[in-house]
Image (spheres, coloured by chain):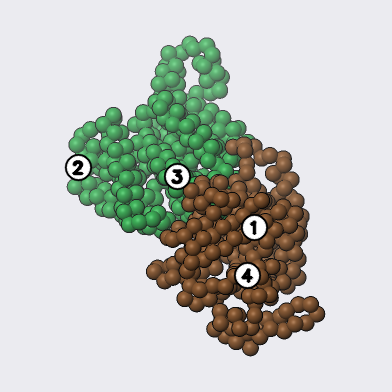
């Protein structure tokens, strides 16, 4: 079922855009390339962008699942510990300095990792791990980054502000995606599946998890840093695309996928497809202009979440 | 032959000594009751035995191995605990919950062993929860949840059953039935049982040995009928307790 959605969303994404393609053109291009223009559009624009959207969505949803179990809080999302704030400050500073592309991405990634270690360091400095403390630290650090972001926005030239805003809302038009990203997603899937049983137990509380033989300190550390790397990577590719990491895991849980052996791969597929669809809409709805994809994720995510919530409650 | 050996154990919370110099050996087939006032250290002791709470002085050994040197999964395959506070109610079904009891034993990362499923279903049957497999846990009554928690513990098949207030949320019929069932399990599996409870009569009925935690870190331990006397209980609870023999039972009640 999810695989079908994934396939359909990718197809939709490949077909839609400033240059409309139909199914016939797509298949003939894939198997017997003829038209130079279509070839270029497809291989140099559409396919990389679709892959970027899928990978970003998958990583965010995966990290959302992990954060929600780790922090045992249904409101947790990949950004709750300040990762997006840190990388935003990195990215915005790079834009301010007139950097783009490679350097922008690096700045965003470094900012994200800095924030990860900052939160972890502060929260652990005062003794034992506690979910409340790490959540509080994350929220506070996020607020701090928020202030820095506002300073950068208010003191920048109009030109820069435009690209900063796009970055902040999440935008795939500048995305560069490589094999490493796909590989990371695959590693994330395999690593996640490997600890999926332990996640099922951890979801019942730390005491229960410990009494059932889960080495909780090692697991927490693993989850914290893998989720952070996934989020940092996603943010580096696409800016802080909101909503995917929070809502996709909940959608799947509401649909009955509570077992992490299903929830983790399901999140990657649904999160990926969701962002692919959102991005297709973002770049076609007011074409040739593009909307930031982060706007679309919320616009289509909110109503679909409410529909699922309603239909499962009445059951 | 499995045994749990506690030697010169001191337990304290925030510098207040709860138990001083505790010595205890629990062997196969034995059922121990752990009694004492609120805050006397019953839960602290149970948590120390499964290694989720550090003890600063003394030794706790399971089959001759120090608990602090065992890994979590080593402990979990031998010792199971029923926690005092109920299971969390994140959305989940009865069957998914009871299957978690197999977690210390599962071999495959992804696949559920048919044998594990069988054990889990049998545990639900034993606790009269069959037919509720697909029910959401948060729609269960308090008593059903407590039975579910017990089913999960039974599914774990430990050598040592630690129970923290097992009679919570259970009506008298369920208390007698479930503890009777556990009693049977303990003897069939050559396991042993240690249960913390406030119900003196329940402990008197189902446990052949008693640890009675007193004030100032003192304790009494031994055969049920030697420990559960009017004098000891009155001293331990700071409240006059009387005992009454009737129809083969001894009844203890505050006076």
Give coordinates of residue B248: x percent, y percent: 79, 77
- The shade of chain B is brown
> Which residue is rendered at x = 54% and y = 68% of the image?
B42
> Along the line of sight, which residue is nearer the eye, A100 or A126?
A126
- Tell me the green chain: A
Residue at mark 1: chain: B
Residue located 52% across and 20% down the image: A26
Q: Residues within 10 Å of mark 2 (few under 14, many from 20)?
A: few
Mark 4–mark 3 distance (CA, rounded to whole Å): 40 Å
Q: Residues within 10 Å of mark 3 (few under 14, many from 20)?
A: few
Q: How many other residues sit within 10 Å of disc 4, few (<14), some (14-19) or many (≥20)?
A: some
Which circle marks residue B222 in the picture?
A: 4
Cα distance between the residues tagged 2 and 4? 82 Å
Task: Pick the residue in front: B194 or B224.
Answer: B224
Residue A222, image x and y in percent?
A: 44, 42
Badge 2 and badge 4 both on one subunit: no
Contact, CB < 8 Å: mark 1 with mark 2?
A: no
Q: Is residue A62 above or below residue A31?
A: below
| Image side of residue A158 versus residue A273, left or right | left
Q: From this viewpoint, which residue is outermost toward the bottom?
A: B255
- Asked whether A201 or B224 is in front, the reply is B224
Residue for badge 2: A157
Residue beneath disc 1: B27
Earlier residue among tags 2 and 3: 2
Same chain for marks 2 and 3? yes
Of marks 2 and 4, the one in the foreground: 4
Which residue in the structure is indicated by mark 3? A218
């Amino acid at each position: 079922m999810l695989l079908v959605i994934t396939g359909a969303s990718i197809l939709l994404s490949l077909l839609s855009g400033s240059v409309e393609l139909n199914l016939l053109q797509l298949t003939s291009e894939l198997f017997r390339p003829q038209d130079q223009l279509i070839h270029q559009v497809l291989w140099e624009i559409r396919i990389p962008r679709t892959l970027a959207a899928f990978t970003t969505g998958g990583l965010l949803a995966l990290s959302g699942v992990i954060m929600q179990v780790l922090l045992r809080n249904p409101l947790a999302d990949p950004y709750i510990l300040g990762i997006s704030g840190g990388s935003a400050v990195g990215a915005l500073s790079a834009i301010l300095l007139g950097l783009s592309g490679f350097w922008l991405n690096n700045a965003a990634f470094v900012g994200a990792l800095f924030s990860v270690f900052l939160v972890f360091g502060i929260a652990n400095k005062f003794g034992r791990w506690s979910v409340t403390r790490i959540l509080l630290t994350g929220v506070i650090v996020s607020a701090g980054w928020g202030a820095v972001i506002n300073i950068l926005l208010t003191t920048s030239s109009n030109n820069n502000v435009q690209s900063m805003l796009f970055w902040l809302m999440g935008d795939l038009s500048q995305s560069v995606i490589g094999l490493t990203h796909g590989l990371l997603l695959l590693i994330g899937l395999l690593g996640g599946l490997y600890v999926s049983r332990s996640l099922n137990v951890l979801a019942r509380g730390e005491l229960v998890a410990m009494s059932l033989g889960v080495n909780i300190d090692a697991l927490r550390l693993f989850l914290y840093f893998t989720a952070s790397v996934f989020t940092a990577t996603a943010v580096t590719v696409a800016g802080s695309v909101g909503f995917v990491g929070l809502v996709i895991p909940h959608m799947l849980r509401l649909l009955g996928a509570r077992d992490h052996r299903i929830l983790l791969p399901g999140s990657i597929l649904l999160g990926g497809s969701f962002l692919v669809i959102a991005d297709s809409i973002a770049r076609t709805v007011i074409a040739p202009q593009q909307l930031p994809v982060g706007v679309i994720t919320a616009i289509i995510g909110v109503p679909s979440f409410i529909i699922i919530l309603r239909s499962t409650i009445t059951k | 032959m499995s045994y749990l050996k506690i030697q010169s154990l001191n337990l304290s919370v925030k510098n207040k000594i709860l138990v001083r110099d505790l010595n205890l050996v629990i062997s196969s087939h034995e059922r121990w009751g752990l009694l004492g006032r609120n805050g006397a250290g019953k839960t602290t002791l149970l948590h120390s035995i499964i290694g989720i709470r550090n003890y600063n002085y003394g030794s706790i050994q399971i089959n001759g191995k120090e608990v602090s040197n065992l890994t979590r999964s080593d402990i979990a395959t031998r010792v199971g605990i029923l926690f005092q506070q109920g299971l969390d109610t994140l959305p989940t079904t009865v069957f998914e919950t009871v299957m978690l009891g197999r977690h210390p034993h599962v071999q495959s990362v992804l696949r559920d062993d048919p044998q594990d499923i069988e054990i889990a279903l049998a545990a639900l049957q034993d606790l009269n929860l069959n037919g509720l497999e697909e029910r959401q846990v948060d729609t269960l009554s308090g008593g059903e949840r407590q039975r579910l928690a017990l089913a999960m513990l039974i599914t774990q098949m430990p050598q040592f059953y630690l129970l923290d207030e097992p009679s919570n949320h259970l009506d008298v019929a369920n208390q007698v039935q479930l503890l009777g069932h556990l009693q049977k399990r303990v003897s069939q599996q050559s396991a042993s049982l240690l249960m913390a409870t406030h119900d003196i009569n329940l402990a008197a009925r189902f446990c052949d040995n008693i640890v009675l935690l007193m004030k100032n870190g003192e304790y009494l331990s031994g055969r049920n009928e030697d420990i559960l006397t009017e004098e000891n209980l009155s001293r331990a609870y700071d409240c006059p307790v009387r005992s009454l023999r009737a129809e083969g039972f001894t009844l203890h009640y505050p006076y």
